[in-house]
Image (cartoon, grey):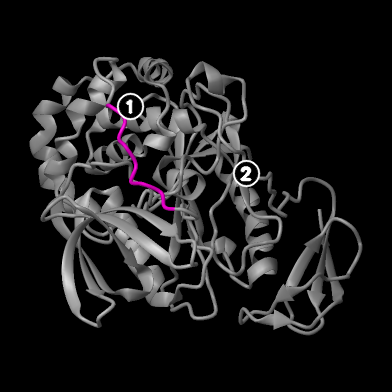
């Protein structure tokens, strides 16, 4: 099954941190015949075997359900629910929700994008997925905002726009948006089209987003940004460039997703809270211990995290009370709290990763106006579908886990046992052959 990853989870895991938890995995299936229950059960059974051999996490085939249904366009879509069992799973197994559709208008060629996975179990070669081009993902969010006017679409469109380093040329984005709207049979959204829905956006803001964000944000700050976004999209106005805070001698701006320096658990928590507040234009109350040992709380606008020439990690910020910029050493920050007070940036915010983490490497990129950026190294997952022909099943002689092989070879690579720990078994006993 070949599909293209899209939606909020794609934006978060493939391009940059949007600071919104998305509840499902959305894919456009590139072959409509694959929206078929027997086919999907066979494919996800293979996926389950691979997941089990790699991690010890089971995706029981009898707990995989696929609902095929006609969508409003008269073609088929699918919602899948995959239950999984880990070392500490309860009787009610947690589930993964997957939404599949096969009739979306994919304007730009999908791209190979590395999945952001900062955990210790990441494979050496990384994880890669076929995903929507970043410009297409942005246009899809714009189209969704105009079509269904949901709070999460408003949140995503504003966040994508605010990430100025990744912002495409509006002409290219508008061209993609026009094609996607034409396919859906709707007009390209305008600011006036959203006015009748402001009450719905405000009413649903807490219900739809409170569980997806570290802290609920003021909806008005997002509604207030819409005029500038639509002016930019339709060429009516280009925001003037902001002047960055000065860079000291030997300083380096830190924009990696995972901080490459030992800052401790508390420091990482402080950084993530500061990044969330800055991305959402919220004032931060900073509890700080100065050089004299005095503790005080300062209200700040956070802009940049830097490593000084001396090796200290320093937060560059502007004080809310007087607009003066100050620097704060991370190891002297005692506490951080995002407020509900918003600010209008005076300088570029350099706290989020610079640009999308994956940049489309296609000839279409220039035609839609996305600037060329450094390409991450190509990384591939080790999973390959089992495919046709006989499959040989071997059982580990130590932990009892079963493995499927296309060759009659009982040699086992390093794997985890059923409890999730490393197994010392290196050879499997033949069990059966599947055809």
Nearest the eye: 368 or 77:
368
45, above or below 426, in the image? above
- For marks 2 and 1, give the CA distance: 29 Å
Residue 264, by quadrant, is: bottom left
Secondary structure found at label 2: loop
Q: Nearer the viewer, mark 2 or mark 1?
A: 2
- Left or right: where 229 falls relative to 113: left
- Left or right: where 28 falls relative to 211: right
Give percent across and percent down for residue 169: 41, 22
Q: Which mark, by number, is residue 375?
A: none
Question: Label 2 neighbourhood size at 10 Å, few (<14), some (14-19), many (20+)?
Answer: few
Give percent across and percent down for residue 337: 21, 66
Residue 404, by quadrant, is: bottom right
* Magenta stretch: includes residue 242: yes
Question: Label 1 neighbourhood size at 10 Å, few (<14), some (14-19), many (20+)?
Answer: many
Give the residue drawn at x 76%, y 51%.
Answer: 386
Instruction: Name, please, the residue furthest toward the right.
Output: 408
**N-terminal label among 2 and 1:** 1
Nearest the eye: 364 or 276:
276
Give percent across and percent down for residue 175: 41, 15
Instruction: Name, please, the residue furthest toward the front.
Output: 249
**Residue position for label 2:** 376
- Left or right: where 413 falls relative to 226: right
* Magenta stretch: includes residue 81: no
Give the extent of the magenta segment: 240-248
- Left or right: where 322 falls relative to 106: left
Give percent across and percent down for residue 293: 25, 83
**Residue position for label 1:** 143
Q: Quadrant of the N terminus?
A: top right
């Amino acid at each position: 099954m070949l599909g293209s990853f899209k939606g909020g989870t794609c934006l978060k895991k493939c391009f940059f941190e949007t600071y919104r938890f998305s509840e499902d995995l959305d894919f456009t299936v590139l072959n409509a015949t694959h929206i078929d229950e027997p086919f999907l059960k066979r494919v996800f059974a293979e996926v389950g075997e691979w997941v089990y051999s790699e991690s010890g996490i089971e995706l029981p085939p009898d707990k995989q359900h696929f609902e095929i249904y006609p969508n409003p366009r008269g073609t088929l879509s699918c919602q899948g629910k995959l239950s999984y069992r880990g070392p500490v799973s309860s009787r009610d197994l947690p589930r993964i929700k997957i939404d599949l559709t096969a009739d979306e208008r994919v304007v730009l060629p999908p791209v190979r994008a590395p999945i952001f996975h900062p955990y210790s179990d990441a494979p050496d070669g990384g994880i890669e997925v076929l995903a929507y081009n970043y410009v297409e993902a942005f246009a899809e969010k714009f189209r969704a905002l105009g079509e269904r006017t949901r709070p999460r679409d408003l949140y995503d469109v504003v966040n994508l726009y605010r990430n100025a380093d990744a912002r495409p040329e509006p002409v290219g984005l508008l061209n993609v948006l026009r094609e996607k709207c034409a396919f859906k049979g709707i007009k390209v959204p305008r600011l006036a089209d959203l006015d009748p829905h402001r009450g719905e956006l405000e009413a649903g803001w807490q219900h739809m987003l409170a569980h997806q964000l570290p802290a609920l944000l003021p909806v008005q700050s997002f509604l207030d940004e819409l005029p500038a976004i639509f002016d930019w999209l339709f060429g009516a106005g280009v925001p003037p460039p902001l002047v960055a805070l000065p860079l000291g001698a030997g300083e380096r701006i830190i924009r990696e997703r995972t901080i490459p320096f030992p800052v401790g658990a508390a420091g990482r928590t402080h950084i993530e809270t500061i990044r969330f507040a800055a991305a959402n234009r919220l004032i931060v109350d900073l509890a700080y211990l100065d050089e004299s040992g005095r503790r005080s709380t300062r209200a700040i606008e956070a802009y940049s995290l830097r490593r000084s020439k001396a090796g200290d990690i320093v937060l560059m910020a502007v004080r809310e009370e007087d607009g003066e910029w100050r620097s704060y050493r991370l190891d002297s920050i005692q506490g951080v709290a995002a407020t509900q007070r918003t600010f209008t940036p005076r300088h570029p915010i350099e706290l989020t990763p610079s640009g999308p983490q994956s940049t489309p490497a296609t000839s279409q990129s220039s035609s839609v106006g996305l600037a060329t950026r450094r390409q991450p190294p190509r990384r591939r997952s080790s999973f390959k579908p089992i495919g046709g022909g006989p499959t040989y099943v071997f059982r580990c002689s130590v932990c009892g886990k079963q493995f499927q092989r296309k060759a009659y070879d009982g040699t086992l690579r390093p794997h985890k046992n059923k409890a999730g720990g490393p197994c010392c078994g290196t050879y499997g006993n033949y069990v059966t052959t599947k055809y």
